[in-house]
Amino acid sequence: MGLWDIVINNLKRRKGKVLFIIAGITIGIATVVTLFSLTTSMNNKMAEDLEEIGTKVLLAPQSEKTSFTYGGITVAQDVAFDIKKIPRDILVLLEARSEELNIKYIAPKIVHEVYLDGKSNLLVGANINSELKLKPWLKYSGSLPDSENEVLLGNSLAEQLAKKPGDSLIISNSNLTIAGVLDETGVQEDNIILAPLVLAESLSGDAGLSLVELVFNNSPNLDADINSLKALVPDVKVTTVREVMESRKEVIDRYENFAFLVSVIVLLIAGLIVVTTMLGAVNERIKEIGIFRAIGFRKKDIIYIITLEAAVACGVGGFFGYVLGVLAAKGAAPLIETELLIGWNPGLFLIMITMAVIIGLIASLLPAVKAAQLDPQDALRYL
Amino acid sequence: MTFIAVNNVSKKYEIGSELKALDNVTLKINQGEFIAIMGPSGSGKSTLLSILGVLNPPTEGNLIIDDIDVFKLANEKQADFRREYLGFIFQQFKLLPYLTAVENVMLPLTVAQISKKEKLQMAEKVLAKIGLESKLHRLPHQLSGGEQGRVAIARAIVNQPPIILADEPTGSLDTKTGQEIIEIFKALNEDGHTILMVTHNKENLEHVKRTVLIRDGKIVN
Ligand SMILES: Nc1ncnc2c1ncn2[C@@H]1O[C@H](COP(=O)(O)OP(=O)(O)OP(=O)(O)O)[C@@H](O)[C@H]1O
Ligand SMILES: [Mg+2]
């Protein structure tokens, strides 16, 4: 018979109240774990993507006239007369220096505005195989274009035009075949026509390139490499596409702030549940506390008993909350982004249990102090 | 030699009220006494006992036990004092209904720095002394009133306090069972415990060495 036995005994005896506390903390911790797991894995996924892809740099023509954006930067439209395209020989130059500058991929593109059903759409001419390597998240159904008049359609565009792989498509009097349809991405690729470079070249009637996407290996000399590139092609606008990832980062950051706020609120509510439940429990136990005090329990023994009861119940809630939270995150991950990896994380598990226990201790402190302050004489008269 | 000294103690429950539950009570008690406190209902017997039990500070006067001015002790020290010096037998016994007989008896040892096994041995020993060795693991509601009274006594004496305070320990028992309880008190008194017992029952006075009569908060004999 120690204080611990009294704690266990009381927990067993007050199953209703204990289950209520456990449920409250379980929900609170589960929410925190779900949100935290999702943000962490989103961040990890982004870092992984960054690492895998390397650092992207876009080369675009210097131009004052701008009218559409692609890949995060604004590109001049070729209907304007003063439009300059990037001369094709830049590719030769880049190929020659690619090793020295740590360039992993060179992906030239021709972006051309086309009209389908009277609506303006972007036709992006590219080396489709390297494009898919560059954007590993791009998936498609059907097959890849293997001749000059086959294209891939963005998911939304295909839906809008009611086209599927194998259908034909007429653009500027050219009869094209839709080889495949890109899976939904949620970004600009949903609305483009992805065509072989040669096709785009012939449709735009111009040999110049709209932009060149470069991918640098993530070396420590990255900034120097990019500066050398700028010196190499002084007539071309060089943009590092960090901004694109930064905008994705911003979305995650915003989500993180939201998650943090929700976590704080949910934990506060869970804490309040513990406070009110324990206050109720203390009121039920006034007589018992009077007996404890009369036979020589100190105030701090009473505080110990009450806070420990809450801490144990909350710790159990923390355990279930963690399990439930991870399961919920695993369930929710595919809805947010495919390939989000949610795992069991012993560190997070320990932190959550600790957090639950600390909430229990803090939330039960007021009821415990109230119990300890009871006048033993008055408490004994309660019958 | 005076072991317990109640010096000019008064107790007013409501601040400012004229009604005194105890009015200038002085009482000297030697070690090994067996005292019955008697008086009509509302005369202040329980109040006196709760002051002697260091549960209820007096409005005036002081209480010296074993040369310690107990109400001058800090609150936590008062709790330690109760544990060390005092064993309580409450009216209706106030056993914890969810603990077995032996667990109830171990309760005062809960905060003591001894092993669980020792606590159990001490509790079993006391219950055996009182004739309850066969009912160690019964819950209070599975015991008769007299047996509950004995568990309450065992709980009061398990940590060997020199002073035992009992508020109407036979109040809820029939004459014969009440008598058995008094016999236990007599034996404890012979073992050296100082006993103060509030009672209404004249039959309880057989072994008592001194009777203190209270009326309207004053000692009258
Ligand atoms: N906590 C309290 N608050 C206010 N008044 C109290 C309190 N406790 C006792 N009293 C009053 O003090 C007086 C003495 O009460 P006490 O309980 O000491 O009497 P008693 O002699 O034990 O009576 P009984 O024989 O009925 O148990 C009574 O008038 C009672 O109403
Ligand atoms: Mg009384």
Image (tube, coloured by chain):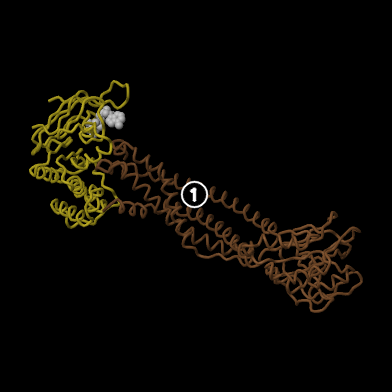
Residue nearest the viewer, comparing A256 with A282:
A256
Q: Chain of mark 1?
A: A
Badge 1 crowding class, 10 Å Cα cut-off, few under 14, some 14 to 19, many 20 or more, is many
Q: Tell me the shade of chain A.
A: brown
Q: Describe residue B144's horizontal placement relative to residue A40 as left or right.
A: left
Residue hosting label 1: A270
Find residue B134 and report its horizontal and vertical position in percent. 18, 58
Instruction: Determine whether A172 is above or below B130 in the image.
Output: below
Residue nearest the viewer, comparing A121 with B13:
A121
Q: Quadrant of residue A331?
A: bottom right
Residue occupying the far bottom of the picture:
A146
Q: Tell me the shade of chain B.
A: yellow
Find residue B189 and report its horizontal and vertical position in percent. 10, 42
Question: Quarter for ligand 1?
Answer: top left
Instruction: Determine whether A182 is above or below B116 in the image.
Output: below
Instruction: Determine whether B57 is above or below A229 in the image.
Output: above
Q: Secondary structure at mark 1?
A: helix
Q: Describe residue B47's horizontal placement relative to residue A267 as left or right.
A: left
Residue nearest the viewer, comparing A3 with A71:
A71
Q: Residue at x 76, y 63 (%)?
A: A232
Identity, as a three-letter code, of the amino acid under mark 1: Ala
Find residue A6 and report its horizontal and vertical position in percent. 31, 51
